[in-house]
């Protein structure tokens, strides 16, 4: 699989919600994707900590990029979408940037499972998400 980071960034720039949240795609490999987000005031909840939805959006972006790599790199598969996700919030970010790293746990013809771990740039664990993805046939997308 030939991975071109600039091309992948252009494709996922169409994810306006993630772009508006300030999420960047930092690294893409077959075995993992890393995305990050600088924490700003717009990401904070009433208690002054990062809002859960902001953290989930970051995990969802890493999950989406990773699960769609075959398609965006020219594979003969349709789009892959999230089928279910479970997130555990593990701690409070103490740094100024969140980093989400994905790994594939299993890959089937139609269903695959990914784990996305979120830490701040200081190494503090913030969240862990497991997502099940469903891949459509190539003629569906």
Image: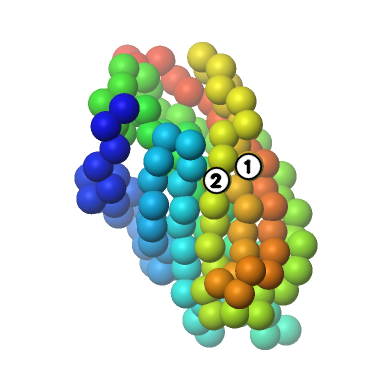
Seen at 39% across and 52% down, the residue is 27
Which residue corresponds to the image point at 48% horizontal and 42% vertical from the top-left? 32
Crowding at dot 2, Cα within 10 Å, few <14 / some 14-19 / many 20+, comes out as many
For the residues bearing labels 2 and 1, Cβ distance under 8 angstroms: yes
What's the CA distance linking mark 2 and mark 1? 6 Å
Residue 57 found in image quarter: bottom right
Q: Residue 139, labelled with which disc? A: none
Callout 1: few (<14), some (14-19), or many (20+) C-alpha neighbours within 10 Å?
many
The residue lying at 67 percent from left, 48 percent from top is 129
Q: Is mark 1 on a helix, strand or loop?
A: strand
Q: Which of marks 2 and 1 is nearer the N terminus?
A: 2
Across and down, in percent, residue 122 comes to: 61, 74
Q: Is residue 129 above or below residue 19?
A: above
Tell whether 67 sits left or right of 127: left
Residue 11 seen: no
Residue 133, quarter of the rendered image: top right
Using residue 85 as the reference point, say whether residue 58 is left or right of it.
Answer: left
Residue 102 badge: 2
């Amino acid at each position: 699989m030939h991975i071109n980071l600039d091309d992948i960034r252009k494709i996922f720039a169409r994810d306006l919600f993630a772009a508006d949240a300030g999420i960047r795609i930092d690294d893409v490999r077959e075995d993992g994707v890393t995305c990050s987000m600088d924490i700003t005031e717009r990401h904070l909840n009433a208690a002054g900590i990062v809002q859960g939805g902001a953290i989930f959006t970051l995990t969802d972006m890493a999950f989406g990029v990773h699960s769609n790599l075959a398609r965006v790199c020219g594979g003969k598969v349709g789009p892959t979408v999230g089928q279910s996700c479970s997130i555990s919030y593990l701690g409070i970010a103490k740094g100024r940037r969140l980093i989400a790293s994905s790994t594939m746990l299993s890959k089937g013809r139609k269903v695959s499972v990914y784990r996305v771990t979120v830490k701040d740039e200081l190494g503090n664990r913030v969240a862990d998400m497991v997502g099940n993805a469903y891949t459509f046939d190539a003629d569906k997308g």
